[in-house]
Amino acid sequence: METEEKIPLECFEKLYVSWFSRMKGFAQEYVVSEEDAENIVQDVFTELWERKELLTYAEMNWVALLFTSIKNKCIDLLRHRIVVQEAVNRMQEEYQITLRMKLDSLEIFDQSILSEQDIEQLISEAIDSLPEKCREIFIKSKIEGKKQKEIADELNVSIKTVENQMNIAYKKIKVRLKDYLPLLIFLFAN
């Protein structure tokens, strides 16, 4: 048994010394980072050592095995990096879109609303555009300052109905005042 262990270890050491730097250069050509290339080659040699029983097969094409293993690890790393980069790009795009919308909204707001009367008129028109029951619940909540339970009791409806009608009101007013984001913040600030 001792002889069997010496042969694989000697084989492995010879293979490692002969091919490590060349394999690292090969990997670095694709993954660019020297550290990543070194890690990939180190992982391949570690996996090879963990399967050292394969080293006893003299007819094995070690160079082909190393190149194939390193190529596959490089592919895995590059695919992972592409997925991560695409996610980062999507988040950046979404952030830029959000910033652009806020900027546009503020610019429109600044240009078109000049007085308190204009603001009141826009809000009033948005509220008036709501369906009757929805408008009534919205006014009781946001203008009269009543709690949902109070509104539900007063109108003889469930709290769930009040919640649903408020959600409908928010959505409809948001659409109606989409160009006036600061108004929405002002209106729904409670």
Image: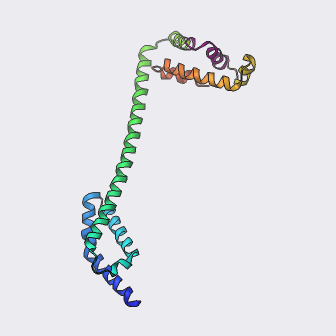
List x then y, in percent, for residue 106.
43, 23
Looking at this view, is 22 or 112 the one in front?
Answer: 22
Q: Is 87 drawn above or below residue 62 in the view shown?
A: above
Residue at image point 35% right, 65% down? 39
**The C terminus: image quadrant:** top right
Q: Is 91 drawn above or below residue 182 in the view shown?
A: below
Query: What colouring does the structure picture have?
Result: rainbow
Residue at image point 34% right, 86% down? 7
Q: Determine the main secondary structure of the stretch shown in magenta.
A: helix
Looking at this view, is 180 or 154 the one in front?
Answer: 154
**The N terminus: image quadrant:** bottom left
List x then y, in percent, for residue 128.
57, 11
Q: Is 13 drawn above or below residue 116 in the view shown?
A: below
Q: Is 136 contained in the magenta span?
A: yes
List x then y, in percent, for residue 144.
67, 16
Residue at image point 69% right, 24% down? 148
Q: Give the range drawn in magenta.
A: 127-144
